[in-house]
Image (tube, rainbow, N blue to C red):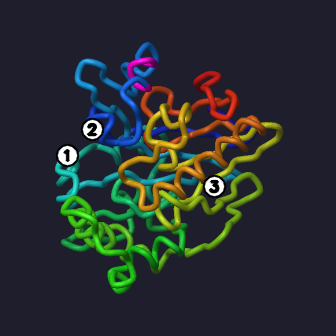
Amino acid sequence: MNIGDVEVLKVVEWQGEIAPARTIVPGSPPGLWADNASWLAPDHWNPETGGYRGAVQTWVLRSEGRTILVDTGVGNDRQRPQIPLFDHLRTDFPARLAAAGVRPEDVDVVVNTHIHYDHVGWNTELRNGEWVPAFPNATYLVPRADQVYFDPRNAHRRPAPRDEREQLRRDGSLLVYADSVAPVLGRAVLWEGSHRIDGNLTLEAAPGHTPGSSVLRVASGSDRAVFVGDLLHSPVQILEPEHSSCFCEDPLEAAKTRHEVLERAADHRELVVPAHFGGSGAAEVRRDGSRFSIHRWA
């Protein structure tokens, strides 16, 4: 699709059923899913199993003559004990990028909306036993707050894990940092607050999911879009934005940020583009009282 002069392509790495829907969005009531089953299925929910369905994907933007990748998925050959489904995943994602006309050497900018394993994986590739940047000519844009938060040298600053599951996530984040973040820091810009990529694209802080979570705003001509990363995992969070995902570092702050981003999207007619929606992957939202509704899919 096109957003003004910006061309947008979606390249899917993986899609399917991940976990029970109310595990992914733990505060969501059962009726929220069942009452919307007619359109949540099959792309976002499996009513037979109660399973959440989603996608891991990269958005390719072509703007002002440059190629920009928004988030880079899980990656191949990774140790991911915190989520066995993606442990040592192997896909043909590089071939899918090539089919979209994207060669590694042609990528100018890589945007990591935040540092979680399924947004930074293809930052790097394993070559001769060493993790190296997968896009050799690209500048990697990484939120400074996340780089500081996930840097193993700062682990002592983080709150103690609340349970074994959170401890597993913490341990897994050390592997993610080592294989997908540290190797690109020599090519990275660590930004704070906001960062303008070009005349059409601007990154803005949107904390809560992680301390450095960000959104990418696109404004070209009269068209607007906002790539929201993991502020939204499921469309039910558009209907009831107070429900954060189980992956949010600060669920209350994430809910506040999500509401603010959806308000702006509704008021300014910004197309909302989350990281993990299946189907078309993007939606127009409208106000519905104090909440929001999906006006139509992109």
Query: How far is mark 2 from mark 1, CA to CA?
Result: 8 Å
x and y percent of residue 136 in the render?
Answer: 44, 67
Rendered position, 113 above or below 143: above
Dot 3: few (<14), some (14–19), or many (≥20) neighbours within 10 Å?
few
x and y percent of residue 14 in the render?
Answer: 31, 39
Q: Which secondary structure, mark 3?
A: strand
x and y percent of residue 110 in the render?
Answer: 51, 60
Mark 3 or mark 2: name the one nearer the start of the chain. Answer: 2
Tell me the residue that label 1 is attached to: 85
Residue at image position (47%, 63%) is 210
Q: Magenta stretch?
A: 32-36
Tell me the residue that label 2 is attached to: 18
Residue contact at pointers 3 and 1, CB within 8 angstroms: no
Residue at image position (68%, 62%) is 197
> In the rendered image, which quarter is residue 26 located in?
top left
Mark 2 or mark 1: name the one nearer the start of the chain. Answer: 2
**Quarter of the rendering occupied by the N terminus:** top right
Q: Inspect the magenta stretch and tell me whether residue 33 lies in it.
A: yes
Dot 2: few (<14), some (14–19), or many (≥20) neighbours within 10 Å?
some
Mark 3 or mark 1: name the one nearer the start of the chain. Answer: 3
> In the rendered image, which quarter is residue 126 located in?
bottom left
Amino acid carrying mark 3 in the image? Arg
Residue contact at pointers 2 and 1, CB within 8 angstroms: yes
Residue found farthest to the top: 38
